Structures are given as C-alpha cells and as structure tokens.
Amino acid sequence: MAAYENRYWWSNDGIRLHARDYPARDAQAAAGRPPILCLPGLTRNARDFDVLAERLSAEWRVLVVNLRGRGDSGYAKDPMSYAPLVYVQDVEKLLGELGCDRYVAIGTSLGGIVTMLLAGAARETLAGVVLNDVGPEIDPVGLSRIRTYVGKSSSWPTWMHAARAVADSNADSYPHYDIGDWLVMAKRLYRLNASGRIVLDYDMKIAEPFRVPGNEAGPDMWRALDRLAGVPVLIVRGAMSDILPAAVADRMVETLGDASLVTIPNVGHAPTMDEPEAVAAIDRLLAGVSREPVAA
C-alpha cells in the first residue's frame, strides 16, 4: 500500500478534520501538476480510495479527505452541519491551508455533489473533474434505498460477520463479488471499536439532514454543473446505478458539451474506479490535464 501522511485541520466551527496526503513517488513526473483531491460518498471514508490513490500517487500528489463525521475526522456537535455546503467550506479550508489554488477533483456520490458546489464557488481552481455515479438529479429509487440504511448502527463480532452483512445489502450493486471482495469492502466501511466490536465508521447523525426532503444535494445542482463548462470532466456511471439514471448522465454530457461518459458494466452504485473501463478513462482525463501549460 502506498505511503501517506496524515493531515489535520480545523473547520470553521471547530471540528478537527483529517485527510490522507499521498506524495507522488516520482516527484519529477509530478512537478508542475496539480494535486488530485478525492472526496468519498455519504457513508464512506478515505479508505474507499486506497487502490486509486496507490495507483495515481505514482506520478501525482493525491489528497483523500475524510468528510466531517467519517473516518478519522471529528464528529459535529450540530448534526445539521452534515450538509454539502458545509463540506465545501471544510474542503476549501484545507485547500487554503495547503496553498492549493488548482487541483483535480474526483468525487464519488456525495463527493461529486461537493465537487459541483466547489465549482460554483471557484471554478478556476478545477483543472479536471471526475464525477463518480452522481449528477445534478438523483434517482428517487436510490434515495429511498439509502434512507433504509443510513444512520442505522450495527456491530459484529468478526470481520466475516461484517462482510456477510455488507454482501446482503450490496449484492445487487456488485453481483460478481466473492467473499474476498466483501471482506475488503467491510474493512473500508467498518472499524474496530474499543470494545472489540466491528462498527460502522461514521457518525450515525449524518442521517438527520439527509432525511429532510430536498436536502440530499444542494440548491439547483444543474446550475452548479453549468459552472464546469470548459473544465475537463469525466462522468463515470455504473450500468445498474439507481442513483445516476442513464438519461441524466446523457443530459450532463449534452449540457457540458465536451464531457466524457464511461459506463461500467455489471456494477450499480457506485463503481470503485479500479474497473478497467474506469482506469482507462481516468488516465485519459489526467493525460490531458498533465499536458496543460503551467500558469505563470
């Protein structure tokens, strides 16, 4: 596994937040390139990007954020701060402290919503964008499914028990997975607590604002998407996704004009981005970014 440094910073409301900072193993190749910023989904954390970060950090600096209430980031006192516009402020604070004024954003699900809102705030900072199985409209079927499990705590005595539970709830999205794959996913979703139980690695209170109708994304996300016009954009969609409908993905490409769309077969929400189709598409996007002239 690629080595990373732990980065900590404080949010505007006093929460200690965490990110993994993977330095490029080939510093010469990375010179002049913007870092890659990875943003995970609603109930996920930085471990979701283990494989992607290891691969890309060969020649790029990669920052992987734990949003507030997830992973090694602190939990919010006010659960209503678990909202996309607040996550944007948290990420902007990190980028400001690092002196990062240009970056490539890779956002999965909620992370993609945060990415679109970041574009609304400062489009010129985005050198490229990957939106992983998310768009300006979310399929109500997927929202209903997420509401059935988000914020419901569970604990298990062994990793095998946790893996079987993950398989039971995600089999439709990953029909080709075997028990080894489910163990990997369980170790991304869960952590070992002080009592020796295996528990979900997020604050159960993240569900409170999510359950308020209309609060899942942000205000007028199509307007936020419009701000990505002219930025190299890749849309990754799971062929069986219940979050990003094919019609919405096609409209995104039409709206942006020159965005690329890749559909991952036999995968629901969300692709892990280590699928061959996703790997090739991300590499194409980054090849274009790396050829851009460095601003004086």
Image (cartoon, rainbow, N blue to C red):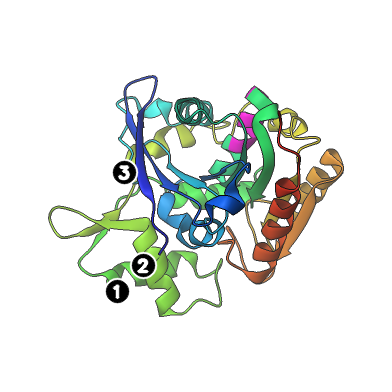
Question: At which x and y percent is residue 17?
Answer: 35, 34
Task: Residue type at mark 3: give it.
Answer: Asp
Q: Main secondary structure of the magenta part?
A: helix
Q: Circle 3 sits in a helix, a strand or a loop, which is it? A: loop
Question: At which x and y percent is residue 195?
Answer: 12, 55
Task: Residue type at mark 1: give it.
Answer: Met
Viewer-side residue, 14 vs 42: 14
Task: Residue type at mark 2: give it.
Answer: Ala
Q: Locate the N terminus by quadrant.
A: bottom left
Q: Residue most toward the left?
A: 195
Q: Earlier in the sequence, mark 1 or mark 3?
A: 3
Q: Locate the C terminus by quadrant.
A: top right
Callout in the foreground (1, 2): 1
Question: At which x and y percent is residue 135?
Answer: 68, 43
User: Where 69 falls versus 153 (above or below)?
Assistant: above
**How far, Cα to Cα, is label 1 from label 3?**
23 Å
Looking at the image, which residue is at 67% across and 57% down? 282
Residue behind mark 3: 72
Looking at the image, which residue is at 23% across and 70% down? 158
Instruction: Look at the image and say whether residue 239 sits in the magenta stretch.
Output: no
Q: Quadrant of residue 162?
A: bottom left
Query: Which label number is shown at residue 165?
Result: 2
Viewer-side residue, 169 vs 178: 178
Span highlighted in magenta in the image:
115-121
Q: Quadrant of residue 262?
A: bottom right
Q: Earlier in the sequence, mark 2 or mark 3?
A: 3
